[in-house]
Amino acid sequence: MNLYETVFIVRQDSTSAQVEALAQDYIKVIRDHGGEVSKTEFCGLRTLAYPIKKNKKGHYVLMNVQSIPAGINEMERLMKLNENILRHLSVRVEALDPNPSPLMQQKNFQIDRARSFDDEQDDLPNLGEMERE
Amino acid sequence: MAYNRENNDSQTGGRPQVRRQFFRRRKTCPFSGQNAMKIDHKDVRTLSKFVSERGKIIPSRISAVSVKKQRELSVAIKRARFLALMPYVSG
């Protein structure tokens, strides 16, 4: 029995009910293989950092899973076949975190603009000459 | 070593003095020691502190992250990019 964290993104056209139904399907698959899903988070519709298949937003779902590898493989296989799921990622972890994940807490994401690293890199004299051309 | 490089650059004379405020880096890795931040690929706010304006990962010689943690951090940032929580290229 291994511990996994799975995140998947559902298309924005789906309703919340459909998203929950989808999650329930996968929970059933895991249970059939003798595992259990301890936490399911429906983080809601979030704006994606870049469009995926022309979708700008998606429903994020996070699941904490304890299962044998065969169960996770089966679940991932089904996710690949489902056309409503844009991305999925399962990561093996050492301990499951029961608290709400940062995905739920950080609904509004902002990138800190404190870094001037890029300005430094662009300051190279060679680039300046090329721009003049 | 970064401080030495800074002195050499003032000899070439081409660079503005912006670098000095930038290279005033922390002595310790922000992810090591007690009360350290955890590296989580879902935690966009922490990860975005180690990413430049264009979205590039900042090297550890500037951000003072230890080698092992820098590798974990870069894996986490790449996972976050895959999950569309962070952009590959921004601005």
Image: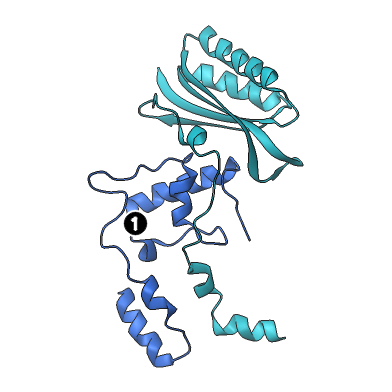
Chain colours: A cyan, B blue
Coordinates of residue A16 in the picture (x, y in percent)? 67, 22
Q: Secondary structure at mark 1?
A: loop
Q: Which residue is mark 1?
A: B65
Question: Is the residue A108 above or below the residue B90 in the image?
Answer: above
Coordinates of residue B84 in the picture (x, y in percent)? 61, 43
Point out the residue furthest to the left here: B34
> Residue at position x 60%, y 13% from top?
A24
Q: Label 1: how many residues lie within 10 Å, few (<14), some (14-19) or many (20+)?
A: many
> Residue at position x 57%, y 10% from top?
A28
Q: Quadrant of residue A99?
A: top left
> Residue at position x 26%, y 62% from top?
B27
Read off the chain for label 1. B
> Residue at position x 53%, y 68% from top?
A118
Quadrant assignment for the N terminus of chain A = top left
Question: Is the residue B87 above or below the residue A15 in the image?
Answer: below
Q: Is residue A33 left or right of residue A84?
A: left
Q: Is residue B29 left or right of residue B82?
A: left
Coordinates of residue B63 in the picture (x, y in percent)? 37, 61
Coordinates of residue B4 in the picture (x, y in percent)? 31, 80
The amino acid type, in three-letter code, at marker 1 is Val
Quadrant assignment for the C terminus of chain A = bottom right
